[in-house]
C-alpha cells in the first residue's frame, strides 16, 4: 500500500510570520530591506578596491617604519640568567619563601605574611599569629604589592627640581646635618606623612633630642584624627577609643562605616559578625541602627537604616542625645538646648525615639559610633551618649596615646 505523506497544516503563527521585527522596514518588507538582506555587507565591501599590490606594500612599509620596526631601541632587552655562586639560606628553587611584615595604615599597622618567589614579593595575606591581627587583609593591603612594580613610582631624590644621585644625596644631607647641629635645629623643619610606626616614633624621639629646636610636622590628605581630638578634649589627655563589638547588643552608627573604611575594620567586622551569630550562650543577635547619607557596607548590614544628609548629622545627633537625656532623667536644660540647636530638621521623630529607647534599655551593652569625618561636636556628643549608656569599660575603652610635640 502506497503511503501518501502530507505536510502538516501551517499554524497560525506560520501564517502571520514573526512576532518581532528589527525595524519598521522589515515589518513592511520594503525593497530597501530586501536589498540589505541580499547583499549582507555594506555597499562597496564586495567590490575590489582600486589599489594594486605594489601600492599596498609601499603604504604598509611606511607604516612599519613609523611604528619603529627595525629600530634598536624597540628590541627586547637582552637578559642573562646567572647561577648563584653561593646558595642563599632558606631559598629553594621553585618553592616560595614566606616572611612576616607590617603595613602602616592610618591609626594602626596591619600585620601581614608576604609570599616571595625568586626574591620578589607576589602575594600578601594577614598574619593571625599577631595578637592584633585577624588573619585577613584589607583591599589596600592587597593592592599595596602592586606599588613595588609600579613603573611610575618615585625612584629618585629631587632637590629644587633636580634629581640627585646617591652620592649627591649623601653629601647634601651631611651638609644639612653639619649646618643645623650647632644651633639645635633652629630654622629646620621636616614634613612627613603620618605613619603609625613604633620604629619611626623612636627615630623621631632621637632626632628631637639631637635637634630640639627643629620642627617635625606630619600631614595627610585624609585626616582621620577627629575622633582622637574629640576624645582628648573630653578626657583631658590624649586617648583613643577602641570598640568591642562582641559585647554590643545595640549599636548606633552616625555615618560610621566601621565594617569597611574604619582603620580597624578587619577586627570590627570579625567582632560584629561574632555578636550577630545566635548561639546558646548568646541567644539574641545584635541590632544595628544606621543614620547615613550614602549607602555604605555598614548601612547595608543595618537592621534599621535612616537616610540623613551628611550636613544634618550634627542636628540628628543632638536629637538622639536629647532623647537619651530624657530617658535618663538628667540635664533637662541641656536636652532642651540640644533640641533647639536641631530645630527645623525634617527627620522621622519616631525613628529617633525608638532607637534611643532601645539603646537605653540595653545600657552596658550599647554603643554609639561616629564616622571619622564627622565634626568634633558630633564625636563629643557620641562620647557623652556612650557615658549615658554605660559603655565605657564594656563596649568601648580608651587607650593612652603619646603626647604630640
Image (spheres, rainbow, N blue to C red):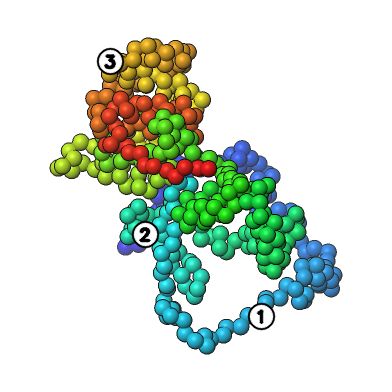
CA gap, disc 2 and disc 3 = 47 Å
Q: Position of residue 330 (x, y in %)?
A: 30, 16
Residue receiving disc 3: 329
Q: Nearer the viewer, mark 2 or mark 1?
A: 2
CA gap, disc 3 and disc 1 = 81 Å
Q: Position of residue 177 (x, y in %)?
A: 65, 58
CA gap, disc 2 and disc 1 = 39 Å
Q: Residue at x 67, y 62 (%)?
A: 174
Q: Quadrant of the N terminus?
A: bottom left
Of the two numbered discs 2 and 1 on the same chain, state the one appearing first in sequence: 1
What element does badge 1 sit on?
Answer: loop
Name the quadrant containing residue 220: top right
Q: Position of residue 17 (x, y in %)?
A: 51, 42
Numbered tag placed on residue 127 in the rendering: 2
- Against 343, residue 290 (above or below) is below
10 Å neighbourhood of mark 1: few (<14), some, or many (≥20)? Answer: few
Residue receiving disc 1: 78
Of the two numbered discs 2 and 3 on the same chain, state the one appearing first in sequence: 2
10 Å neighbourhood of mark 3: few (<14), some, or many (≥20)? Answer: few
Q: Residue at x 28, y 21 (%)?
A: 357
Q: Residue at x 76, y 76 (%)?
A: 72
For the residue pair 142 and 204, the one nearer the viewer reads as 204
Q: Residue at x 38, y 29 (%)?
A: 383
- Against 66, residue 13 (above or below) is above
Which residue reaches farthest bottom? 85
Of the two numbered discs 3 and 1 on the same chain, state the one appearing first in sequence: 1
Amino acid at each position: 500500500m502506497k503511503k501518501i505523506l502530507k505536510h502538516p497544516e501551517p499554524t497560525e503563527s506560520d501564517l502571520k510570520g514573526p512576532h518581532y521585527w528589527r525595524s519598521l522596514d522589515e515589518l513592511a518588507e520594503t525593497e530597501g530591506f530586501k536589498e540589505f538582506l541580499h547583499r549582507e555587507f555594506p555597499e562597496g565591501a564586495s567590490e575590489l578596491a582600486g589599489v594594486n599590490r605594489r601600492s599596498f606594500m609601499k603604504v604598509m612599509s611606511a607604516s612599519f617604519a613609523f611604528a619603529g620596526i627595525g629600530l634598536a631601541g624597540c628590541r627586547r632587552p637582552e637578559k642573562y640568567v646567572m647561577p648563584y655562586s653561593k646558595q642563599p639560606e632558606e631559598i629553594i628553587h621553585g618553592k616560595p619563601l614566606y616572611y612576616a611584615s607590617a603595613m602602616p595604615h592610618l591609626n594602626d599597622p596591619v600585620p601581614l605574611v608576604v609570599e616571595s618567589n625568586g626574591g620578589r614579593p607576589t602575594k600578601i595575606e594577614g598574619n593571625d599569629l599577631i595578637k592584633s591581627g585577624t588573619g585577613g587583609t584589607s583591599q589596600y593591603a592587597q593592592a599595596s604589592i602592586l606599588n613595588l612594580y609600579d613603573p611610575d613610582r618615585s625612584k629618585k631624590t629631587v632637590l629644587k627640581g633636580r634629581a640627585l644621585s646617591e652620592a649627591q644625596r649623601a653629601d647634601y644631607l651631611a651638609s644639612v646635618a653639619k649646618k643645623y647641629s650647632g644651633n639645635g635645629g633652629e630654622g629646620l623643619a621636616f614634613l612627613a606623612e603620618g605613619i603609625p610606626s613604633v620604629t619611626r616614633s623612636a627615630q623621631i624621639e632621637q632626632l628631637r633630642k639631637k635637634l630640639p629646636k627643629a620642627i617635625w610636622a606630619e600631614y595627610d590628605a585624609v585626616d582621620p584624627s577627629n575622633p582622637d581630638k574629640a576624645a582628648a578634649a573630653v578626657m583631658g589627655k590624649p586617648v583613643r577609643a577602641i570598640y568591642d563589638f562582641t559585647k554590643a547588643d545595640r549599636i548606633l552608627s552616625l555615618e560610621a562605616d566601621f565594617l569597611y573604611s574604619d582603620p580597624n575594620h578587619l577586627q570590627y567586622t570579625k567582632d560584629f559578625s561574632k555578636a550577630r551569630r545566635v548561639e546558646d550562650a548568646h541567644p539574641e543577635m545584635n541590632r544595628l541602627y544606621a543614620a547615613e547619607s550614602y549607602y555604605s557596607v555598614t548601612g547595608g548590614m543595618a537592621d534599621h537604616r535612616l537616610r540623613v544628609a551628611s550636613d544634618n548629622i550634627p542636628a540628628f545627633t543632638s536629637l538622639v542625645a536629647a532623647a537619651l537625656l530624657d530617658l535618663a532623667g538628667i540635664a533637662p536644660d541641656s536636652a532642651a538646648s540640644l533640641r533647639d540647636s536641631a530645630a527645623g530638621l525634617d527627620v522621622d521623630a519616631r525613628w529617633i525615639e525608638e532607637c534611643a529607647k532601645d539603646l537605653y534599655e540595653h545600657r552596658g551593652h550599647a554603643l554609639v559610633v561616629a564616622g571619622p569625618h564627622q565634626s568634633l561636636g558630633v564625636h563629643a556628643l557620641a562620647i557623652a551618649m556612650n557615658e549615658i549608656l554605660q559603655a565605657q569599660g564594656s563596649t568601648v575603652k580608651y587607650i593612652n596615646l603619646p603626647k604630640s610635640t
